[in-house]
Image: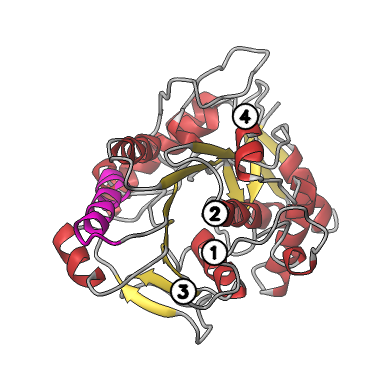
Amino acid sequence: METNISDHIIRQALPSMEDAEGDSSSARPSPPWEGSGEVSVLITGASGFIGSFIVEEALQRGMKVWAAVRKSSSRQYLTDKRINFIELDFSSEDNLKHQLEGHHFDYVVHAAGVTKCLHEDDFFRVNTQGTKNLVNAILALNMPIKRFVYLSSLSVFGAIKEKRPYSEISEDDVPKPNTAYGRSKLEAERYLDTIGNDFSYIILRPTGVYGPREKDYFLMAKSIKQHVDFAVGFRRQDITFVYVKDVVQAVFLAFDHGMSGRKYFLSDGNVYQSSTFSNYIHEELNRPWWIRITAPVWLLRIVTFFGERIAQRTGKISALNNDKYNILRQRNWRCNIEPTMDELGYHAQYDLQRGVKETIAWYKENKWL
């Protein structure tokens, strides 16, 4: 089976954001904070792909939303006048304490981070040290938050359980991250684990997240529209996905479900083969004629090697880098979401076919395709 290059960029709503509002048949009662404008949430990475959806859902729930952004951040998807903006400098604990002083948040969702960097150290500066600085600032200010939700990634485990037949990665497995991104996320997780019981937190580990506004998987759709589906590798690869609205569902469930310190995988519960994603995209694009080009993994190694060197010389971040090589050659992306379902009450509402249909429709409506 081949491995589509653009469809495996791992980073990193109740039933759905629309369905949750009208679902009165659920046996689970609404959380006591839902619908109260007095409850506040700080969302870092609010201008990003996942963060912007978290902001929208928090507003729908009547929460007081604080969106953490940088001066340079785009606010394209943050136009609601109810949003309160706060600029945070994650590079400095002292600056964060000054910027957060006087604020009170019931919940903090830390979705800020980087998935591609020019230099490996930048992953740790942003993903690891930035998380440490934020947590330390909250603790230093004695801010009595009810829960801190950290968005990590399945990539913290790396290429384990690679022998066929593939089995699910579970929380009991030993992480062996094979990317700088995965190592930086794992270090942030381990720092959270060192904090005492007075700090309530949950870690979410989504697999490949896709949906409207996402720019990496979009490149695959764009390529297919231009009649080329480029793939790498011939050995079977089991891959998993999670739609952005299901990630958002898990975030809000984590506010008042699950045990502090627990780590939960997120996927749609299905396992796919490498060509499935491109087949669904092809279908939603009304089946344009296409050529499927499959290259060996060793060729990807050469391309990413030179891609990274060129990026370092030009100062422009490239998607063709060493992390991408290690991600694409990994064969097993299965993960066990049973604890997520049992303890958080999480149930994915989007399988890949439904999610791709909604995503491609959004790309078309917004003139991306």
Mark 1 — residue?
Answer: 54
Q: Tell which circle, 3 or 4, labels the residue nearer the N-terminal end.
A: 3
Distance from disc 1 to disc 3, alpha carbons, whole Å, reads 10 Å
Q: Are marks 2 and 1 in contact (CB under 8 Å)?
A: yes
> Neighbour class for label 1 at 10 Å: few (<14), some, many (≥20)?
many
Q: Quadrant of the C terminus?
A: bottom right
Taking the spot 51% from the left edge, 55% from the top edge, the residue there is 255
Give the answer, above or below, for where 208 lies relative to 330: below
Question: Which residues are drawn in magenta?
Answer: 123-143
Q: Tell which circle, 2 or 3, labels the residue nearer the N-terminal end.
A: 3
Residue sticking out furthest to the bottom = 81
Q: Is 12 displayed left or right of 367 in the figure?
A: left
> Neighbour class for label 2 at 10 Å: few (<14), some, many (≥20)?
many
Q: Position of residue 109 (x, y in %)?
A: 44, 58
Identified by mark 2, the residue type is Val
Residue sticking out furthest to the left = 94
Distance from disc 2 to disc 3, alpha carbons, whole Å, reads 14 Å
Q: Position of residue 60 (x, y in %)?
A: 62, 74
Q: Tell which circle, 4 or 2, labels the residue nearer the N-terminal end.
A: 2
Distance from disc 3 to disc 4, alpha carbons, whole Å, reads 32 Å
Taking the spot 66% from the left edge, 61% from the top edge, the residue there is 30
Q: Position of residue 353 (x, y in %)?
A: 79, 48
Q: Is 72 displayed left or right of 172 in the figure?
A: left
Identified by mark 3, the residue type is Val
Q: Tell which circle, 2 or 1, labels the residue nearer the N-terminal end.
A: 1
Q: Is residue 92 visible?
A: no
**Mark 4: secondary structure:** loop
Mark 3 — residue?
Answer: 65
Mark 4 — residue?
Answer: 336
Identified by mark 1, the residue type is Ile
